Amino acid sequence: MTANAAVKEIAKREYEHGFVTAVESDSAPRGLNEEIIRFISSKKNEPDFLLEWRLKSYRHWLKMKEPTWQNVQHAPIDYQDIIYYSAPKPKKSLTSLDELDPEILATYQKLGIPLHEQKLLAGVAVDAVFDSVSVATTFKEKLAEKGIIFCSFSEAVRNHPDLVMKYLGSVVPYTDNYFATLNSAVFSDGSFCYVPKGVRCPMELSTYFRINAADTGQFERTLIVADEGSYVSYLEGCTAPMRDKNQLHAAVVELVALPGAQIKYSTVQNWYPGDSEGRGGIFNFVTKRGRASENAKISWTQVETGSAITWKYPSVILQGDNSIGEFYSVALTNHRQQADTGTKMIHIGKNTRSTILSKGISAGRGQNTYRGLVKIQKGATGARNYTQCDSLLIGSHCGAHTFPYIEVRNNSSTAEHEACTSKIAEDQLFYCRQRGLSEEDAVSMIVNGFCKEVFKELPMEFAVEAQKLLSVSLEGAVG
Amino acid sequence: MAHAPMLEIKNLHATVGDKEILKGINLSIHAGEVHALMGPNGSGKSTLAQVLAGRETYRVTAGEVRYEGKNLLELPPEERAVAGIFLAFQYPVEIPGVGNLYFLRTALNAVRKRRGLEELDPMDFLALAKERMKRVELDQSFMNRSVNEGFSGGEKKRNEIFQLAVLEPKLAILDETDSGLDIDALRIIAKGVNSLRSKDRAMLVITHYQRLLDYIVPDRVHVMAAGRIASSGGKELALELEKKGYSWIEEQQPPKTGRPGARAQ
């Protein structure tokens, strides 16, 4: 690509969510041991089953090794140098939104999250997780009329222990992988949602994650259970302040779609990516998986623009006959960001169908890897998969890598895979510029066009945000 | 200033890689004029168009280009667009996933903004676009298709003229807009172009064939050969060329230095 000095000079916009909020927080001492786990559990007044589960996870974790197969590079993580629990110190226990620490409220307002119900855009209920603790859940009453439970994970443990006990770890067992196991031991909060039989959730549910305190890890856990024939659409957004040390975010999301249920899970991930030299940023090591019973459908849509390193594979276990799994992904790496992301579609039931559409964009010195597994078991007769992975390169110092694994164990199934890698062509840029667009606007337009098939899967208001985010993340990418 | 040309090219030399394509072009175009630029393959017509539009693949090694009295060569492509230069591409580029109308509205508003004009809101723009689409008989289904993606050759060319009609530049350069068109499409395009002729607007129409000039009647005709303008005249020059072929011009040329048939693209 032709160098363009004018564009090079355009100041890179600073990460706009990089402010720190001054709230007093209540933290555990640095490091990890059984005492810390007991401390977290007791802070949250958890029932014994959960403490036992945490301890079991911790003991299992001690026997595990950090995985090294992913196509990313980082300095070793010192797990004893992390603060595993940090909660904003409440003045007293909260009974309504009005009592929320005004500093936190101001933070969410800065982030554009409408916490005040009266100010809410109709149709979005928000659960906000600040550092490790869920601080507010809006629209709870309205949802309760339909029998929908939408609350923080801690609250679910207190008020609906049977549901938690039944489904926690049912999709991602505590032994699953290094980071999921660590999460199982130390998770501090997260969101919980249960949609009863036959209920169509009347609004988009949303969780907003924010890491504020320094040197803390964020280990939240989300559990969504959609009972038979129900429907829920869930949005997740994330930001963090700019800090020059890496911070670990190891979350677990479990989705349970019972027969005939539909879960649509959308993520716009904008954790602090580190500076242009690769200092700081979030290590986003996340395990997301759903289990679909017969005739159920799970859709993952993700727009990953933030984090120094992204390592996640939102997956679907297509257990029931005729179940459907979908994965739509846009992952952008600029500067020195690295992403190793993709999905796993495990076909167990008959006539199960899965669609994978992955769009990777690499700019600067970014490295972008698609890694996917399509596994069609012997009993999954008539199963079908369609995979399309497209990569777009901007400039000549970035990289795109694709590792698709396909295992088909019966001969009545079909798996299709298409992949293409392209560079933003000089003629496309010139065409746009000849019509009057600046080089940066042209790149942003071409990239947005490249991602269109994924963006159209996002709920409206998220799609707009995702487009803007992509433009901001690409600033300084040309030249 | 009233009599100064809108575009004045003096002794323009340009290279791609280490190959010289333009070897001293001299050309002046006044507002209100339509100039036709003809010549065989490889003579440098498209290169001249691209150099005027600011393509960085080509390096200008000597000469100057003044546009409305300003040094055009120091402007990046988008600033030339803002200044009112439009190039109808010989090979219009596909931009997957970007809606045709969205693209054009963004371009128009980018240009308007830089000119200090108010941006058009989507409704006003839609009204304008629909009216201009009629001029080139482009079906409204093209509004929301991706830019040029899956368009036939003729549709792409009509889309270029549609963009021209919306952007209303001062200087329109049409690079072989007629190539690959059947006679009906040619008429439609010529009608569209003719409707844009005005005393404030100049056009440089690049073509291989006299045929187009039956419909878009030029004020001046120039014939290029081997990187230079070998001959200039009125519209009758095109007819003479049609009869005698390009070899007639080339024979009048000093010894050629460039490889015949070598293309800039």
Image (spheres, rainbow, N blue to C red):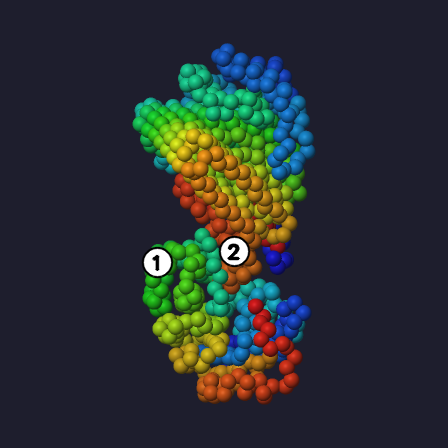
Q: Residues within 10 Å of mark 2 (few under 14, many from 20)?
A: many
Q: Is residue B58 above or below residue A40?
A: below
Q: Is residue B227 above or below residue B133?
A: below
Q: Which mark is residue A456?
A: none
Residue, disc 1: B141
Please tell me in which quadrant of the rendered image residue A427 appears.
bottom right
Q: Is residue B78 above or below residue A194?
A: below
Q: Secondary structure at mark 1?
A: helix
Q: Secondary structure at mark 2?
A: helix
Residue, disc 2: A442
Which chain is indicated by disc 1?
B
Q: Residues within 10 Å of mark 1 (few under 14, many from 20)?
A: few
Who is closer to the viewer here, A130 or A182?
A182
The quadrant the C terminus of chain A occupies is bottom right
Do marks 2 and 1 share a chain?
Answer: no
Q: Residue at x 49, y 41 (%)?
A: A329
C-alpha distance separating marks 2 and 1: 24 Å
The percent coordinates of residue A472 (x first, y second) are 54, 46
Q: Nearer the viewer, mark 2 or mark 1?
A: 1
Q: Residue at x 61, y 68 (%)?
A: B58
Q: Are marks 2 and 1 in contact (CB under 8 Å)?
A: no
